[in-house]
Image (cartoon, grey):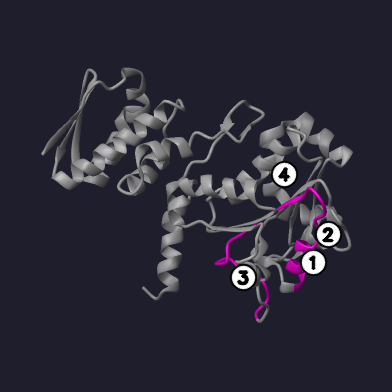
Amino acid sequence: MEKTLAGVNIEYLSAVFGAFDENIEIIEKECGVKIISRADMVSVTGEKSNVEHAENTLNSLFEIAKTRDVIDTQTVKYIISLSDQQSKENIAKALDQCICITFSGKPIKPKTISQKKYIDSINKNVVTFGVGPAGTGKTYLAVALAVNALKNKQLSKIVLTRPAVEAGESLGFLPGDLQNKVDPYLRPLYDALFDMLGPDTYQRYMEKGIIEIAPLAYMRGRTLENSFIILDEAQNTTIEQMKMFLTRFGFNSKIVVTGDVTQVDLPKGKTSGLIHALKILNNIDMIGIYKFDKRDIIRHELVQKIVDAYENTSKGR
């Protein structure tokens, strides 16, 4: 079967095809078709179901090309996995929501349908849990939304925290004072903020206390009002720590809790506060729980293969 997409906007062809036609090569391989471009026409040849799958993918990519300059291979593979389930209008609309502009001028947009739903959950609820494997953008998107709320004066403070749980290393062997010892645990949060605010604004906000980054233990006994509070690596909290954290917020505050329940580094016999919270808080108003899966991994494609390998091992395959 051959299907022709006529009247294709030449302006978007290069974005959809990618450098040296790498995007098209992926579609051909994954869908089992042959794709040829002639002027403003694109023809797809192959088995009927394969051609329809490729056509849906191409239509989705052309819609996305209208909203961005570059379409990377990860986006192509993600659209291939969804194009038989989602309409091109829904995909393009979902991926066209700019939530923040980085210091370098790059717009931060959701890259998957799941990221869009996660963003919507954070905007809608007072407390949102974002749970899933590494590379799904859980923490980065939460920080982006926090920075956006700060810039728009919706909130006056950002508080970022992590439990300082030792994953094979010992804090005692790290050089320096307490702050030096816990900084490695908080580095991903520093990096995300630096990316969005730039060095000068980042430093100024830190000095004024507008942004606070601290180990989870520093949260005890506090009430945080008018704040955007993010708890990262929450799978490494105990039940007591999670309860303590979730009762820290005051009026006009928002909490985002992120973690990966497959990466618990707590001592043997300790129950993860994140796993416990997901069980007991899933039916409470103003609390949202969003779970990512391996399809939502937006880091290097090798990350997804590594996640797959560990999943298969844990299942005894």
Question: Which residue corresponds to mark 2?
Answer: 219
Q: Are the residues flagged by discs 2 and 1 in contact, CB closer than 8 Å?
A: yes
- The CA span between labels 3 and 4 is 26 Å
- Residue 260 position within the rendered picture, expressed as x and y whole percent measured from the top left: 58, 62
Q: Nearer the viewer, mark 3 or mark 4?
A: 3
Q: Could you classify mark 4 by the number of other residues whose Cα lies within 10 Å: few (under 14), some (14-19), or many (20 or more)?
A: some
- The CA span between labels 2 and 3 is 20 Å
- The CA span between labels 1 and 3 is 15 Å
Q: Nearer the viewer, mark 2 or mark 1?
A: 1
Q: Amino acid at mark 2?
A: Met
Q: N-terminal of the two: label 2 or label 1?
A: 2
- The CA span between labels 2 and 1 is 8 Å
Any mark on residue 190, and which?
4
Q: Is residue 60 magenta?
A: no
Of helix, strand and loop, which one carries label 3? Answer: helix
Please state if 243 lies on the left or on the right of 41 as rendered: right
Residue that extends furthest to the left in the rendered view of this protein? 1
Question: Which residue corresponds to mark 3?
Answer: 275
Residue that extends furthest to the front in the rendered view of this protein? 285
Q: Amino acid at mark 1?
A: Met
